[in-house]
Amino acid sequence: VSCCRPSTHSLKLPGGYRIGDVVFNKIHLVENGGPLAFGDRGTILGVSTVDPDNMMLCKFGLLPAMDIPVDQVERELAGGYSNGDIVISKIDVTASSGFVAIGDRGTVIGPSTISKSKILCKFANVDSVDISPAQVEHELAGGLRIGDVVVSKIALTKSEGTVAIGDQGTVLGPATISRESRILCNFVHYSTLCVPVSAVARQPPAGYRIGDIVVSQADSADSKGSVAIGDRGTVIGVAAARRKDQILCKFVRHASAILRPDQVKPEELPGGYHIGDIVFSKIDSTDTNGTVQIGDRGTVISACRFHGELQILCRFPRHPWMSLLPDQVEREVGARREDTSAQQLGGQATKHGLLEVDLSG
């Protein structure tokens, strides 16, 4: 493989390709500008000057234009799919070789044999079926899907935008590079960000958020551990792709319990407050960490102990964690809870999923 400038030698390309065609790379290699991974998406620029009969000039992401053997790439299929992509059926389909049910997981195996607007897929009970891209859903890296709401696990600042830990975003689709491990997401302050799937977590259903403290309302046990009524835990994510109506919680005796939203309830803090509640300060207070004045708007982020007394811990614009008695704040009328998580507290220690900071020292 070598890099060169587009050629005007001829517009006839091997393999029936045309300038502007979108292709996917089929092998991994290291080029002058960096690695080219399997599944990276590129565009054909023109004829190769190295071997015009067997190679084409292509451009992948930020890498320089390069000559690629025609058998090293494959065409983008209908709907933007590529061979090997995982899909979830959105309809019931009866094929000559079997039946596909809604929710069945399959693999794209090539272009349709009957229409350019369809793709050929393989499912557990069907060897091959021609199906429209609109009739399947693309399962992305990490089991995520387009439209899933996610929470950022990293902080990032670039010229294109910023993302903070805990920011909520939406999955846009597969990444154009390293699509087996990356996805494209939209965040409030970063419109299109390509991130490793490990950098985000799927937002749980039913109004719960990652980091929320909950109390179990059901006894539950499996091979991984047990949860009893009254156990306190932390919401750490959403259950597997086919159980997206359930949440994943961490408890003392179970590191990843799968529960329905009605099997837990938000933990009530002193004064009936909950994590994420919006409050206004009723006092002026200053310490080494910052200042809070009457009327300052803040967010309840946890429980805490001050000289042995259980209080609430609040975050204000000029104070990262102020310990207050419930009667020293008032709840904002009609306020919606804000996203909060232990990660946003600058690495404060957690104990059994409850962020309970002792400020008496």
Image: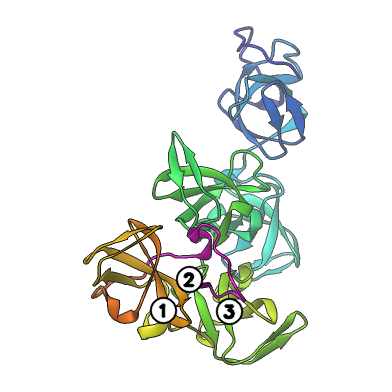
- Quadrant for residue 37, please give it: top right
- Residue stretch in magenta: 338-361
Residue 359 is marked as 2
Q: Nearer the viewer, residue 252 or 14?
A: 252
Separation of residues labelled 1 and 2 (CA atoms): 10 Å
Query: Would you place residue 64 above or below residue 260 in this image?
Result: above
How far across and down, in percent of the image, does residue 113 sit?
Answer: 68, 47
Q: What residue is drawn where x is 51% and y is 73%? A: 358
Query: Would you place residue 359 above or below residue 261 in this image?
Result: above
Q: Main secondary structure of the magenta part?
A: loop
Residue 233 is marked as 3
Foreground tag (3 vs 1): 1
Foreground tag (2 vs 3): 2
The local crowd at label 1, few if under 14, some if 14 to 19, many if 20 or more residues have their Cα within 10 Å, is many
Q: State yes or no: discs 2 and 3 in contact (Cβ < 8 Å).
A: no
How far across and down, in percent of the image, does residue 315 sit?
Answer: 38, 64
Residue 296 falls left or right of residue 344: left
The local crowd at label 3, few if under 14, some if 14 to 19, many if 20 or more residues have their Cα within 10 Å, is many
Residue 106 is marked as none
Q: Is residue 116 visible?
A: no
What residue type is disc 1 on? Gln
What residue type is disc 2 on? Leu
Residue 288 falls left or right of residue 342: left
Q: Which residue is labeled 1 in the image? A: 311
Separation of residues labelled 2 and 3 (CA atoms): 22 Å
Q: Nearer the viewer, residue 269 or 263?
A: 269
Q: Nearer the viewer, residue 176 or 72?
A: 176
Q: Nearer the viewer, residue 57 or 252?
A: 252
Separation of residues labelled 3 and 1 (CA atoms): 19 Å
Q: Disc 1 on helix, strand or loop?
A: strand
Q: Disc 3 on helix, strand or loop?
A: strand
Q: Earlier in the sequence, mark 3 or mark 1?
A: 3
